Amino acid sequence: MKHIPFAIAILTLFFLANPLRAETMFETPRDALDTYLSACERGDQKAAVQCYTASSRKLVEMSGLLDDSDASARLKALYERLQTVEFREEKYSDTRAAMWPDDETIPPFLFRIQDREEGWRMDYHFMSHYIQADEDGWSWRNKRLFEIWKTRK
């Protein structure tokens, strides 16, 4: 009987931590991108965030972006912009890749395996820090960005 409280504590920790874990394992960056675009088409912010790495999901959760009332409309607008774009995968390592759009006005989507059990995920955390828009357009053409991206573990 002494083991019952310990088991309950372990199960409680599992269920408390479980919402932070994504529900699906993506075998390829393309799988993650396709699922993300499908969530964008529906305007489903929670499903879109499930395509992010664990650190990206935590960032979104802490930033309050999930509570943004305009998120659904922005995701739908993003889908409208991307629905006819073709993407080419470029793999840098066993855990890092980019999906390059055929439209050069759109920055690439960066993917990585942060947790082997989750597979490939979009690294929104990295992208939000290094890919920025300004009056001259997107700064994603920065060569240093991709050197940082390619060489990180």
Image: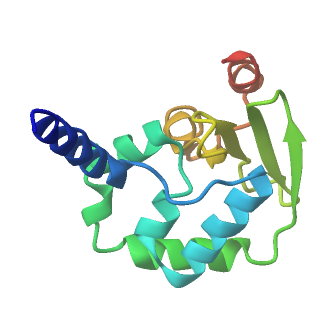
Query: What's the residue at 44%, 36% (across, down)?
Result: 55
The answer to whether residue 136 shows anywhere in this view is no
How far from the left and from the top, in percent, is residue 148? 68, 19
How far from the left and from the top, in percent, is residue 89? 87, 48
Farthest residue, direction bottom = 42
Q: Nearer the viewer, residue 38 or 132?
A: 38
Please tell me in which quadrant of the rendered image residue 150 appears.
top right
Q: Nearer the viewer, residue 151 or 19?
A: 19
Q: How is the image coloured?
A: rainbow
Where is 46 relative to 131, above or below?
A: below
Query: What's the residue at 67%, 37% (across, down)?
Result: 112
Query: What's the residue at 61%, 47% (across, down)?
Result: 122
How far from the left and from the top, in percent, is residue 40? 56, 74
The answer to whether residue 39 shows anywhere in this view is yes
| Quadrant housing the N terminus | top left
Query: What's the residue at 27%, 52% (across, down)?
Result: 15
| Quadrant housing the C terminus | top right
Q: Is residue 125 left or right of residue 15?
A: right
Tally the numbered discs: 0
Q: Nearer the viewer, residue 137 or 55?
A: 55
Please tell me in which quadrant of the rendered image residue 32 appears.
bottom right
How far from the left and from the top, in percent, is residue 79? 63, 75
Please tell me in which quadrant of the rendered image residue 46 appears.
bottom left
